[in-house]
Amino acid sequence: MCLLLATLPALAAESDPAGAARAMALVRTLARPAPARTAYTEVRFVGMLDRALVLRGEMTWLGGSRLQRSVVTPYPETTTIDGDTATLQHGQRAPQKFSLGRAPELKDLLGSFVALLSGDALALARDFTLHAYGDQAAWTLDLVPRDAAVARRIRDVSVDGSGKTLRCMRVDETDGDTTFTLLGPLGDAKLPDAPTPAGLATLCAGA
Amino acid sequence: MNNEIHAPDPPRRAARGVIVLLLWLLALGALGAYSAWQLRISSDLRAFLPAPRTSLQHLLLRELGQGAGARTLLLAIRTPDAERAATLSSALRARLIASGQFNTVQNGSGDLQQIAPALLPYRYLLAPTLDHQRFDAAYLRSELEQRLDDLGAPGASVLKPLLPSDPTLETLKLAERWAPRHAPPLRHGVWYADSAALLLLETRAAGFDPDAQARAVRVIEQAWAGLPQHAQAHLELNGPGYFGVVVQALTRHTAEHLGWAAGGGLVLLLLLAYRSVRAVLLAALPLLSAALVGTTVLALVFGGAHGLTLAFGITLLGVAQEYPLRLLSHRRIGEDPRASARALGPVLLLAMASTAIAYLAFFASGVAGLQQLALFTLSGILAAGLSTRYLLPMLLPVARRDAGAQRWLAALARGLTRLPRARVFAVLLALAAVFVLLLAPGPWWQNNLAALTPVPLPLLQREGVLRKALGAPDVRYLLVLEGDSAEQVLRHSAAAAPTFAPLLAQGALDTLMLPSTYLPPLAVQRARQARLPDRAQLQTALDQALRGLPYRAGLFAPFVRDVEIARTLPLLTPQAFERTPLGGLLRALLIERHGRWFGLGLVGGVRDPAALARAAQATHGLVRLVDLKTETESWVASYRQRILAALGGAALLLITVVTLGLRRWRAVLRVLAALALALLLALAALRLLVGALNLFHLVALLLAAGLGLHYALFFERARHAAADERLRTLHATLLCAASTLLAFGVYALASLPVLRALGLTVTLGIAANLLAAALLTWPRATPPAC
């Protein structure tokens, strides 16, 4: 009886402790030595726009909490994240420095990239509650933000992969906008002229 | 001798004594009730600063007490659990806002992009964009292209809600302009740094009013204690107002603590000396009369008194305690105490009058606090002296033993009388003291206000850290603008602002908040408004700019509508701005004093004061840099000059009264020489022990001088007295000195600078005065035979 009571709070905090442990183990297998580089394609479905925004470039984990996101097309832009500071270099404009403390959702999202690329399961579990589905060949990792301020903007993040490879990351925002980031083998994937969320979801699922 | 009247019929005397005692107690009760009902005790320290003369001084005095810097309280909710800290921070903020004690309560929550809705329509008049741009097709096109890139950048989520009504991001420009540039990072929606959620409060109460600040602190503590889960975190308070509260509580606590110890020792000493509980209890009545008459007179004349006046005043009443002790010691066996009082009368009156009259000099100081102090002490001394002379003798028991008839006293008196070369020794001592005073290194005076209100050092250091983390304005530097009207001050502010921009860019300072940072002058607003296109022009330009861009049709309709509204808005006046939720910010920076308008520039994180001074100079008088530390120091200095002048005046009055009272040149010379020697010795000892002197040392020296005058006068009187009267004089003087030393010696051991300064100075002063009186006024000839 006592034992049962003692385990209750843990159950309340993590509705699926076995699933969370599996998710943590899965993230650990993703660990790669820095610098870990991957080509990526980002497709953004924004309600204000008639068509999706498509950006292609390269994402690099530089070690520690340093991440570089370089856009190559349609315009050159580099964002460098170092801990709590981000530096944005857009085309010929002067570099802009800003504190990620001001935008917690951004901090957690970029942090999740670092955690996934470096296999830092603990860091990921600190910012999100984790659930894992599927099997070794095709798995899905579901991330729900813990921070209330982050949760106000981001509803859900899901990451698809197979084995030790990341394939895709999907971010659903609370305003209905969705961003797909295709990574690794999908990083240079050919896309239709007018991509749709459904099409990309299919691509990510690896069917 | 003819004054050896013996006690009258005991039963009649006892009956009269009871009536007098009852009437006296009744009178004291009435005085106590009146002053408790009428006397308002203020704690505004500015009563102790000299009255300001120029309008700038007026403004600074106001800033010192009511300025944003002085009213800032910094709170840290310490817990490693950021989420819990955030919950507590938000709950505390809600309660503090609801309390109504605070102008602002900031904790980082409430989106920075969220500008008061009332100001949103004014964004095109408030932001500087239209000074350089027009809303034509080319400008809009470049902005819309950038927004498209922004939507693809990591930070897009912040911008999306703004885009339809504000594609040029005026709201963000204003938020950036108005937000603290160096705010701490946000975690769970609130400021959180170094394992603590941070809050920045501005109290409604003035910073220089410790009681009002204490109320605000209590509100915070109660709100905190009422929060669920507050026990799992630690609340830390800081800031100038809190310092005042801490120092006051600490001083009161220590003073009470030590006061009880000293009081107990004193009662024990008196009981040992007089072996009569009744006599010791009755001796407290003149002292009580002094305190109650003093407060009643203050209530009648000033209607109120400063807390510090009362504290100092009661200290100075230490002089009054002498009178009953003198009377007790001078009673002869079997003699009616009224006869003892009559014999003591002339010297008692002279001592009392000279001390009381000397305090008149403080009326000329022009400082309200000092005038109150003088009136309190003067009336208190008169009350104690007169009641000792005329009332106390009717109540005192007839002495059954002679206080002076003790062998050790007789031996001491003989020793003092036969002291070889006493005057030569006195001269040598005086020379040594002068030598020390001339050669002691370091400054004579402590001008730092911080030394007057001592704050525990760790608290001060912590404040610096928190203030920096929160980007709160500096309490030391201030920019000041002046003009005939609010509009003129705003114009000056707008004209001077570009001069300071490079300093911010170079990092010579972190933040600068000028009045025009919030509200541009009307002329600037009018010019911006004139550059806004009309509806048709804007729609055409927008359509042209949107060609080929993927924005949804009709997305920017809110933008077109808002610009149209802004074109016909009445310009924003300071009065209108102050009615908005951000109004408090401008109200703190735009102030009217005596028909002149002043603007303040709050600076934060000053790293290079010299560069700031140069920039202020470069505005050719539009902006003045004020260093509040220097200003207050010069104030303290001018204050001290007034006290010194008052002391000089007191010395002159004292010499006059003593001369008129004693009427013999040699006696006058002896008494004044003893006082001067004691003053020299005490000053030299203080210079050696504490270095720079402050206000508290001066007040304490004054008390010591008052007591010293008594010693000298009574010793002088003993020159013409019989042997047994000399012994009683010595007994009374030693007992008075011992009781004062006991009371103040305890304070000399206190760790608080204020109490230590008072205690040490009085202790040194008493020792010096006793020595000087013994060397210069104690009789050198054996007593005349009776």
Image (cartoon, grey):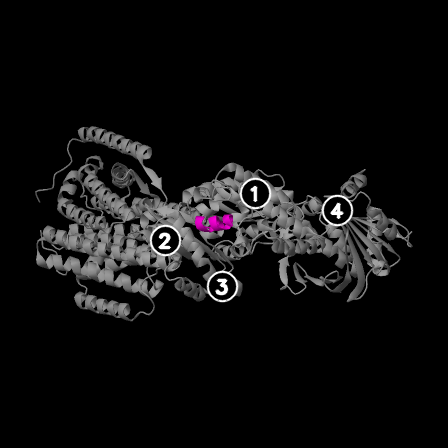
**Secondary structure under the numbered disc 4 in the rendered image:** loop
Residue B719 place in picture, x, y as percent? 13, 55
Task: Compute the Cα span from label 4 to label 3.
Answer: 42 Å
Amino acid type assigned to the residue bearing label 2 in the image: Glu
| In the foreground, B207 or B551 | B551
Instruction: For marks 2 and 4, give the CA distance.
Output: 52 Å
- Residue under the image location 73 percent in, 52 percent down: A126
Q: Are marks 1 and 3 in contact (CB under 8 Å)?
A: no
Q: Indicate the secondary structure of the residue bearing disc 2.
A: strand
Left or right placement of residue B52 versus residue B599 in this view: left
- Mark 1 or mark 3, which has the lower sequence index? 3
Which quadrant holds residue B386? top left
Q: How far across and how far down the image is residue B481, in percent?
A: 39, 54
**Which mark identifies residue B482?**
2
Mark 1 near mark 2, Cβ–Cβ under 8 Å?
A: no
The chief SS type of the magenta part is helix
Query: Could you say whether the residue bearing mark 3 is in a helix, strand or loop?
Result: helix
Q: Does the magenta stretch include residue B520?
A: yes
Q: Mark 3 points at which residue?
A: B503
Q: Residue at x 72, y 55 (%)?
A: B152
Q: Have a look at marks 4 and 1 and say if they share a chain.
A: no
Asked which quadrant contains residue B279, the reply is: top left
Which residue bears the numbered disc 4? A177
Q: Name the residue under label 1.
A: B564
Q: Residue B485 carries which label?
A: none
Amino acid residing under circle 1 = Glu
The chain carrying label 4 is A
Whichever of callouts 1 and 2 sits on the residue coming sooner in the sequence is 2
* Visible residue check, residue B504: yes
